[in-house]
Amino acid sequence: MKEYSENYLLKPERAVGIIGYGAYVPRYRLPASEVNRIWRSGHGGVPVKEKSVPGLDEDVVTMSIEAARNALSRTNVLPTDIRAVWVGSESHPYAVKPTSTIVAEAIGAVPNVQAGDWQFACKAGTEAIVAAIGLVGSKMANYAMAIGMDTAQGKPGDALEYTAAAGGAAYLIGPADESVAIINCTYSFVTDTPDFWRRAYQKYPEHGQRFTGEPAYFKHVTEAGKYLMKATGTSAEDYTYAVFHQPNTKFPQRAATSLGFSAEQISAGLLAPLIGNTYAGAAIIGLTAILDIAKPGDRIMMVSFGSGAGSDAFSITVTEEINKFRDKAPSTQDYISRRTEIDYAVYSRMRGKLVMK
Amino acid sequence: MTEVVIAGIGQTSVGEKWEVSLRELAFYAIEQALEDSGGLNPQALYVGNMLAPQISRQAQLGTLIADFAGMNGIEAVTIEAAGASGGAALRSGFLAVSSGLVDVVLVVGVEKFMDQVGSVIDSALATAIDSDYEAVHGLTLTAQAAMLMRRYIYEFNTPRSAFAAFPLTAHANGVANPNAMFRKAIKPETYERAGIVSDPINMFDVAPNADGAAAVILTRKDLLPSGFPHPFIRIAGSSLVTDTLSLHDRPHPLVFHAARVSVERACQQARITPIQMDFFELDDAFSIYALLSLEAAGFAEKGQGWHLSHDNCLGLNGSMPICTMGGSKARGNPGGATGVYQAVEAVMQLRGHAGENQIKDARRAMIQCLGGPASTAATHILETLS
């Protein structure tokens, strides 16, 4: 048996692609220096510059609707032609009751539609995309909406509080010949690696500290990326852009370097320094930022990572259609520059961190 | 008394071994030691370990490891004395062989921190101090070492920078040790800039907890197979001494009394003085421990040990090299395995197998590990037989 068999690649019978894409980032920003001020007396380094914070009336439902509407705006597809609305998140507002039905209703995709919520820590969004590729690629449906969105929870004082952010993206998946970017194939690398988790009734996730690095993030991201390149006969220089799950600034930079990508290749999609870690939205909102500037023919590699743990790697090629639809909705950078800075006190109120009982 | 020789050595690299279990870790070291000994068959196994019941929820390491290593049925038991566990296990092995009751002993030091993270490890380590009178107040080993260091600085008007010599020496020596966790030398500026862990202890004043296992085979010289390929190295002196468990019960907290008495007894047994050693593998779990250990061993007067760092006597070419393979600071601190690592590293030096870190013509080594602030001190003197 060959060490690298193409059999492990996930590739649909019918070629599929991204018909429309949309990003969403809430307007509020908490500088990491604020977390430092409160919890570290201002000492020590910070993993990002600032993170996005959802407003008082925002949650994964409202944010998913925003992103999905942006994605639809970049298409000529009727919402009633959508056969699936899938939302991946680790901050679904309800434990029981789908986010996706509310989103599907809001965008006008009901009632002839599949709806479901996905959960795989930070790769729930790409999990939904891969499923959508399967649905469309098998011709069971022509269009499926896959969303990755989070209002991530960071325990006060924990290392993750600096980065746990809000935001994400929505992708309408459909036939390749209508797409702004073709998804050539994907590859998923998954093991039982308990690096980060939140049990039922817990408010905040726990994590394995340094265990989240080497054996979790780096192993899965690099294995997925390496295999995708080997199996597709490509190397880093064949891609114009690459984007990785971005829990902070350094992790994706290091993963990129180890896979042979340059700083230029990842800069467009590296948003964590400015918006933090949007969890299920992190890799895929990096991709919306890339699609905002990519040219036809550009190749993009995306590798997500979800704790628990696994990575989905995507090989994507931008088509001529991109120029027709790109400007039909706000760009990712529009959302990033729409910025209202808040301090830790306001953040505490907005995120319900003040608990006296 | 029967002459006890170290016939085989083995060690794993030290670090974050997420993927290796406690039993596997121990086995990797045992496998090497058995092979190195030319195939001796141990009749007894002494396991030095400090934290397995709390961190890995595993007791009976003697049985666990003997079984996993294919030695089911032999005598096997865990020896625990916090950070001195490895030295205490070595001492037990020495007693067994020198008594004539056991021909071949396997001593394994194994510690696995990475089964847990964060405060679980701090709590487990705090069991090394007095639970009723120290840990109950929230004291940890690091906080206690910080108080000792602050007191030392106050009493002896010591510049803070004097402590840099210990991590600097350890890191310089760790570079050429393939089993070391940190193989990068550090500069004085790096030490000065390091973040504070527990004032005045900075990041370089505390050795990193890490997973690792080391093993030695002890036997009598006359039982060695013919054609035994290594120089004969005997345990010339062995001693284990205890002090008060609580630091506040000691008349002079800055005197590591047990460490001193342990050195005296081991030296008396070996009929040599500390100054005749070619190097000293001391316990550098904290910079202040290393300093107080040097004073306890008589290499400096009380309050004067920090001058040794000025005179550069601690480096590989100094008058009394310490931490020759990186010590706990650079090799990594494998808790209850430390004493066995020290024995393995000392044997490498005495065999002339220490590579770039070789101490020229090394014939005598003193190794010492401590439980907490020398609440237990285990000292051994290893000597090349001519």
Image (cartoon, coloured by chain):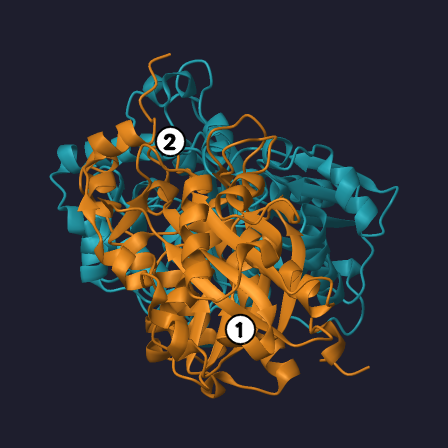
Residue B362 position (above or below residue B300): below
Chain represented in orange: A
Which residue is located at x 73 percent, y 45 percent? B97
Please identify the quadrant where the N terminus of chain B is shown. top right
The residue sitting at the right extreme is B73
Query: Relative to the observer, which residue lies in front, A98 or A51?
Result: A98
Q: Does residue A44 appear to the left or right of A279 in the view shown?
A: left
Instruction: Identify the subunit bearing mark 1.
Output: B
Left or right position of B321 against B358: left
**Image location (x, y in percent) of residue A268:** 33, 71
Residue at image position (77%, 59%) is B222
Q: Between B199 and A160, which is closer to the camera in this rendering?
A: A160
The span from disc 2 to disc 1 (Cα, nearest Å) is 33 Å
Residue under label 2, please give it.
B257
Which residue is rendered at x = 50% and y = 61% of the image?
A: A171
Q: Which chain carries label 2?
A: B
Three-letter amino acid code at the position of disc 1? Gly
Left or right side of B46 for B269: left
Q: What element carries label 2?
A: helix
Q: What element carries label 1?
A: loop
> Can residue B358 be seen in the rendering of this structure?
no
Mark 1 closeness class: few <14, some 14–19, many ≥20 residues within 10 Å = some
Tags 2 and 1 touching, CB below 8 Å: no
Q: Position of residue B225 (x, y in %)?
A: 80, 66
Residue matched to label 1: B352
What colour is chain B? cyan
The amino acid on which the numbered mark 2 sits, given as a three-letter code, is His
Q: Which of marks 2 and 1 is nearer the N terminus?
A: 2
